[in-house]
Amino acid sequence: MIIDSHAHIGFNEHLNKSPEELISSMEKAGIDISMVYAGEINDCSNDRLLKELENFKGKLFPVGSISPLSKDKPSLDKFKEWLDNKKIFGVKFYPGYEPFYPYDEVLKPYFKIMEERKVPAIFHNGDTYNLKKGAKLKYAHPLHIDDLAVDFPELPIIIAHLGYPWMIDAAEVAYKNKNVYVDCSGLFYGEIGNTEEEMVKKFLDTFVEYAGGTDKLIFGTDWPISNQADYVRIIKNVFKDREDLDNILFKNSVYVFNIKL
Ligand SMILES: [Zn+2]
């Protein structure tokens, strides 16, 4: 079993991919389930995501998105309904691409609802792929996650992309806070070359060294930014000697996203 905890569909010039294309990539890569993220950045609203994934239950799991800066935030009642009826399995936030810190006051009522239900909050962290003009890196530093993790100790949190290039900071925040996990997505663009493969291995080794192991590491690709089949191959290769490879490839996702297999 393999779960890709971090994939996108989208409908604009930044990212134009359908659920059907995702399914065909998963088949090539041997991935059973993908968590699929909404995002205004890709013209994929929460409502559109739910509609697009309707016919792919059990394979593609919707993860919503909320921007504290948007006029179009869901009401708290609507939000509760999504969570209680398992319409969405997590919420993705895009600090860095948008100028807000993870502990933004506007988001706190949503975090409270998520914490009560143990629904994970996923944060874009680290480098901002050049999709959007005006991105500001300071908002995407993993150290800001620590504030949120301390104030909402029961809220599961995932730092995306190992917080690249701040892997050591991401590892420390995950090591210190029992509710913080880290996904390994988006560490290369497209298909992987030999030099990139060595680099990705180095990033992962650095993270694991400082995090004290892999028990907080979650497999994710950031498809279509990164090729899923290459990602599966490289993760299996880097962690081939570890007994806990299944934790990385799917068990941590099952636990954090509360998926019933
Ligand atoms: Zn992403």
Image: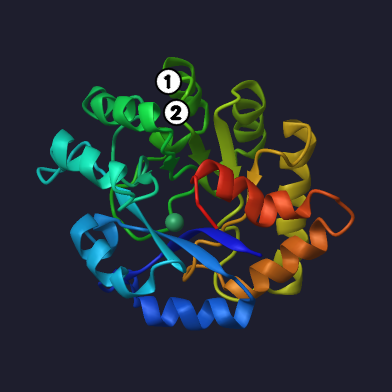
Q: What amino acid is labelled 2 in the image? A: Leu
Q: Is residue 102 visible to the viewer in this orientation of the structure? A: no
Could you tell me which secondary element the residue under label 1 belongs to? loop
Q: Give the vertical position of 215 relative to 223 (above or below).
A: above
Residue 31 in the image: x percent, y percent?
60, 71
Residue 16 occupies which quadrant of the picture?
Answer: bottom left
Q: Which residue shows up at 45% across the image and 19% down it?
A: 147
Residue found at the very far top of the displayed protein: 151
The tag on residue 155 is 2
In depth, the one of 193 and 217 nearer the eye is 217
Residue 28 in the image: x percent, y percent?
60, 83
Quadrant where the C terminus is found in the figure: bottom right
Q: Is residue 228 left or right of 109 when viewed as pictured?
A: right
Q: Which residue shows up at 66% across the image and 44% down it?
A: 217
In depth, the one of 50 and 72 nearer the eye is 50
Q: Is residue 129 left or right of 70 when viewed as pictured?
A: right
Q: Give the vertical position of 211 relative to 220 (above or below).
A: above
Q: Is residue 72 left or right of 121 when viewed as pictured?
A: left
Q: Which residue is mark 1?
A: 152
Residue 1 occupies which quadrant of the picture?
Answer: bottom right
